Image: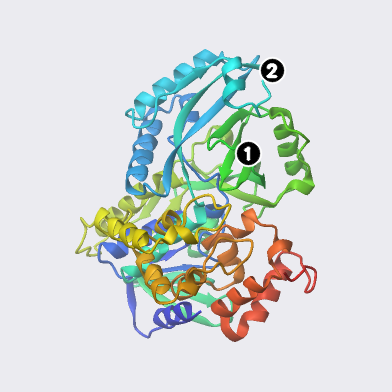
Amino acid sequence: MELRNSNIKRLQKDNRVFDVLVLGGGINGAVSAASLAAKGAKVALIDRGDFAGETSSNSSNLAWGGIKYLESHEYFLVNKLCKSRNHLMESYPSTVQEIRFLTTIAKGFRYPAFFVYLGTIFYWMIGRFFTQAPDYMSVKEIREREPIINTDNAAGGFEYSDAYLYDNDARFVFNFVRSSMNYGCVAANYVESTNATREGDHWLVEARDVLSGEQFQIRSKVLINACGPYVDEHNLKTGQKTEHRHLFSKGIHLIVDKLTKERRILAFFASDGRLFFVIPMGNKTVVGTTDTQVDSPEVGVTEEDRQFVLDNINHLLKLDSPITREDIIAERCGVRPLAQKGGDGVADWVKLSRKHAIDVNKTDQHLSIFGGKTTDCINVGDEIAEYVEGMGIDLPHREFKWYGEDDDTVRDEFFHQAKLMELDEYTVEGSSEMLTQRLWRRYGGNALELLEDIRQNPKQAKRLMKKAEYLRCEIEHTARFEMVTKLEDFLRRRSKITQVVRDEDIVDTKGLRAACEIFFGEQAEEKLEEYKRSVGLAVGDSENP
């Protein structure tokens, strides 16, 4: 909590004027802050919840070039997204990785299977042949390659490549937040903007610490509204008129035990024609999603949603026994904010693309970011920097490369030291990857600090929680640098523990209590009980292994 408390004091500093204040710590806000801070601007970032707390922690974990937009002939968009996907894979090779999509086309589908396959060839060409080539399959070949698929009604299929986030979306977003802080950004979660007014050359933002209720003011020259699905809501508070507004599509995913040993994504068209995925997540599998228009970003998984996914997965796969509600380990639910130009709310929302839009009010020094995809995040950061510089904010390091993993020199040093220490010997049995690779992927060059902790005290390499892979040194590192304010911040967003382990299997373990003490000190028990209440578990509901 020390990092957050320190940053809130810095936000409250009298007469301090930031160059830019970013509202919202999802992917759009995180890359905006990271880009601007690295280029030399004085930046602040606040979010009324945790970073990546809404849409950015409920995606399909895909970084794809938008193959579905070929059907609506949005070729320029597909070209842009493929370029962005390739750039993301090059910039984050340990995190954003190529993965094969095996797509089965049912008999009677609106296009013949081979015609759809030709579309994947075109997609591969637009993607500059950056990935493996597509591969057409007969029904027999589908059975041989992935026996779990129910091919009774299949006409054919194919494999093509796109990319996905090996860890999870929220972790990917937080690494941009941390990068921004490394370059001097003053960031704090659970700080809400209750109102903002333009006074002379500055924005005066009324802020409230959500945890303490304390109110204070933040001044900035430029205000960026990156509130995700709540962009329109905040613009109403500030009287901003924008060209775009949001429509919302709700998507859900269910997480179950691993369904297939192959590391590929199975793609289908569900019973109502919508895309449906079976996605690997370490030792688990994610199934979904729905795509339902809703009026509000306040959404949850309904019984109808749940049953739709269960019915489709049981129909599309040949399983030893049907997946039931009892097999669900965790659920993901969120809205996709879709940018609509004109704002009349009557667009064909299914055909709306996920591309982002930035509305600029140069007179008020105000920007609003609508829509967007993880795939396109680097472009968002670069575009925001250009707009902010155009508003008169000096960016002394405007050409600085603000994104990407640490360079090969740092990587080679880390892997060399890890090999000398025989670090992989500490890999937990049943892990989805070796420890050296996992630490590099999650922490980059900061993982060298973890090696030093282990070198000085080998007990730091001990797994702290029985059902999770995290080492004691990782928990201590997270407590110092990753602004864990509530237990959920760590369990759900800095890590994906509660996405792969049932709450009741971990919530009362000794290891989690030890982690709480590292994170929260004297508040450990209070924070643990707060989390139990949030997931509907009363004290004493679980065993204490």
- Residue position for label 2: 153
Left or right of 383, for residue 228: right
Expressed as whole percent of the image width and height from the top left, the position of residue 269 reads 62, 27
Which residue, given by chain and number where applicable, does mark 1 sit on? 291
Compared with 113, 284 (above or below) is below
Colouring chosen for the image of the structure: rainbow
Q: Quadrant of the C terminus?
A: bottom right
Residue at the spot x=54%, y=71% of the render? 190
Q: Residue at x 62, y 17 (%)?
A: 109
Snapshot quadrant of residue 142: top right
**Residue 156, visible in the rendered structure:** no
Closer to us: 436 or 94: 436
Q: Tell me how far mark 2 sits from mark 1, CA to CA.
A: 24 Å
Amino acid type at image mark 2: Asn
Asked if the residue under mark 1 is in contact with the one under mark 2, i.e. CB atoms within 8 Å, the reply is no
Q: How many marks?
A: 2
x, y percent for residue 97: 42, 42
Q: Of label 2 and label 1, which has the lower sequence position?
A: 2
Q: Secondary structure at mark 2?
A: loop
Residue 175 is marked as none
- Whether residue 98 is visible, yes or no, is yes
Badge 1 amino acid: Asp
Query: Residue 446: x percent and y percent?
Result: 36, 66
Can you tell which of label 2 and label 1 is closer to the viewer?
2
